[in-house]
Amino acid sequence: MSGAGVSEVTVRVPMNIALVKYWGKRDEQLILPLNDSISLTVDKLTAETTVRMIQGVGENTVEINGRRVELSSNKRYQTVFDEALRLQRKRKEDSNQNETECISHHFEVISKTNFPVAAGLASSAAGFAAIGRAIQKILNLNDTQANRLARIGSGSACRSMFGGLVHWKKGEKEDGSDCVAVRADSENWKDLYCIILVFDDERKKVGSSEGMRRTRETSTLLKHRIESVVPERIEQVKKAYESRNFQDLARVIMADSNQFHAVCLDSVPPIRYLNESSWRLIEVVEKFNQQEVKAAYTFDAGPNACVIVQKDDVPAFIKAALQDISIPSEDLKSVEEDLNVSFEGPLNS
Ligand code: DP6
């Protein structure tokens, strides 16, 4: 939609969950990672975002879930807006448009997520990916430029620009031109479900940027991970996904989550993201997988779990989890409705 001097676009973009984690930057300004990562896009958890690009001098504003974001302490938004304006100028120069006057612009962003923000659930990924997509539409940018806009907002955001399995390549170049996310599957694995267990919706104590810096500067295990572990795991994930081999996929996902938390513990001072509930969930999954691997846990920079299971195994997993973990009854009801199943016995509340 456009009015006099205002361009407005609304998009809805999903979050993603990393199966092989990104942890550590080779360039903090451009957000270039030390290693490749690969993720699954979680369709149902989204950020609906409206971006307005308004002609004239004015203050940039960002509102997330009804709350105004303090931009002086969240510099990433300004970086994204500056880059958008740079790309716009470049496009005009490239098309030889004779701009005698310099027109200034400012941005308004209004975003609503349908899941908790900053609880280690990659909410910034969906948010910045949505801003990148919306600005792409307003300025008619190509996919690589939109990818870059999302990435300089939050690294993992560039993986939310596509559905399915997404491979974010670290690239080698200093300007980041070969650091892009690309779709890595030929067809979506529709049966994969992601059960999110929120044990703590507080903002994490050590943010990703600070945590990554600390690990990069102090962990000896990180070097081994980047050079000898991650490249092989990326290939294993792609192969298992393509051949629909759930057991192989699940084993890599859990191993990589564990190694990510191991490099956090290997940092000085150590970073501990998992709590008692996270460990209880790990035990639940281990027990559930005793006969056959049918569930995979993964944790980002926080205690909340994402458990990946195939659709048919969702009810059995939830029943198993209920023996040790309390799940709010309204959440159980929504699963019952979604999958047309019922959980017997008294529900936890
Ligand atoms: C543990 O993308 O939030 O979730 O680039 O500093 O914004 P910044 O970090 P962010 O880090 C995500 C880290 C992770 C793993 C992952 O998503 O790959």
Image (cartoon, rainbow, N blue to C red):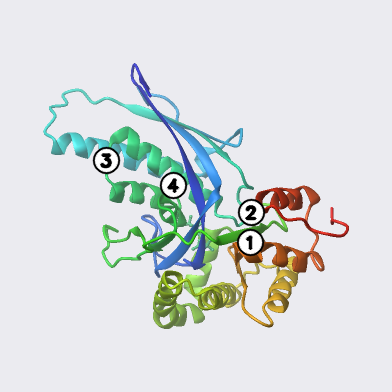
Coordinates of residue 205 in the picture (x, y in percent): 65, 58
Residue 119's disc is: 2
Indicate whether 10 appears above or below 259: above
Query: Observer-nearest residue: 169 or 269?
Result: 169
Q: Which residue is mark 1?
A: 302
Question: Could you tell me the amino acid type at mark 2?
Answer: Ala
Amino acid under disc 3:
Leu
| Distance CA(mark 3)–CA(mark 1) | 35 Å
Upstream in sequence: badge 3 or badge 4: 3
Q: Give coordinates of residue 237: x percent, y percent.
A: 45, 73
Q: Earlier in the sequence, mark 2 or mark 1?
A: 2
Which image quarter: residue 206? bottom right
Is there a contact, CB below 8 Å, between mark 2 and mark 1?
yes
62 in relation to 201, above or below: above
For residue 142, what is the image quadrant?
top left
Q: Circles 2 and 4: CB distance less than 8 Å?
A: no
Report how far apart the C-alphas of labels 2 and 4 lie in the structure: 18 Å
Apparent side of residue 109 relative to residue 284 in the rendered image (left or right): left
Is disc 3 in contact with disc 1, using a CB cutoff of under 8 Å? no
Whether residue 205 is visible to the viewer of this picture, yes or no, is: no
> Marks 4 and 1, Cα distance to the nearest angstrom?
21 Å
Say which label, 3 or 2, has the lower sequence index.
3
> Upstream in the sequence, badge 2 or badge 4?
2
The quadrant of the rendering that contains the N terminus is: top left
Q: Which residue is mark 3?
A: 87
Q: Check disc 4 and report the residue beneath it.
A: 129
Alpha-carbon span between mark 3 and mark 2: 32 Å
Query: x, y (%) of residue 10?
Result: 45, 33
